[in-house]
Image (cartoon, rainbow, N blue to C red):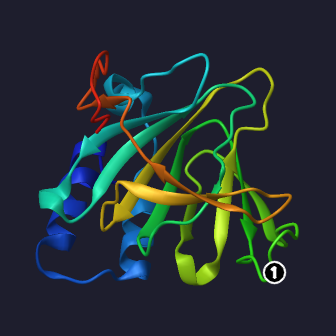
Amino acid sequence: MVSFVQLVVQIREIFEHKMVDVDEVMKLMGSYKSDINEWRRFAIFDMNKYTRNLVDIGNGKYNLMILCWGPGMASSVHDHTDAHCFVKILDGELTETKYDWPKKKHTPLETIENKTYGLNGVSYMNDELGLHRMENQSHSNGAVSLHLYIPPYSTCNAFDERTGKKTKCTVTFYSKYGEKIDYHGSKEGK
């Protein structure tokens, strides 16, 4: 079993020289057993939206972040702009709904799979597998997840589930390295 710090270090080591080996990363993510005392300082919630809290930039090769989900919060249906996406549940449960890419304009997205992940569950997604949405379906409990994106990205596409309409979105961090970011007056949002 590895600690959170060891997990971060081992992820960095994996990507010093290698391309993405999905099985190796899944195994490593699965080897960490969540301990709130190890990651609490990165888990910053907002009562109005889920938050993306940067933990490590991985020498520019990836972003490792902790996402905090209040009760009932969900992401939009989105792609990953050709990045690999690994998710590990650190606290609570998240439901991942996978969708096929839109085939026709103005038609609802087709659901491929719907799966709920509990504590220490690990999921993988990339654009070849389709689109997805992550959701905390609890109406009383928050959830926390660890996300690894390789390579890092600053934009993605969100999709309207009812029409398949695509909208380009800029993604931002709520905090970096355990410190909330003050975007007041900033145009950047990164």
Going by the numbered disc 1, the residue's amino acid type is: Lys
Q: Secondary structure at mark 1?
A: loop
The location of residue 152, given as percent across then percent down, is 31, 60
The image quarter in which residue 149 lies: bottom left
**Image height check: is 72 above or below 9?**
above
Which residue is more in the foreground, 80 or 85? 80
Picture coordinates of residue 73 (x, y %)?
Answer: 69, 33
Q: Residues within 10 Å of mark 1 (few under 14, many from 20)?
A: few
Which residue: 81% across, 80% down? Answer: 104
Q: At 36% from the left edge and 36% from the top edge, which residue is drawn?
A: 173
**Disc 1: which residue:** 104
The reply, left or right, for residue 94 in relation to residue 106 is: left
Question: Viewed as shown, does residue 17 lie left or right of 71?
Answer: left
Residue 46 relative to residue 2: left or right: right
Horizontally, residue 110 falls left or right of residue 75, namely right
Q: Quadrant of residue 66?
A: top left
| Residue for point 20% across, 66% down | 61
What is the quadrant of the N terminus in the image?
Answer: bottom left
Instruction: Please tell me which residue lies in front, 190 or 54.
Output: 190
The residue nearer to you, when weighing 114 against 172, is 172
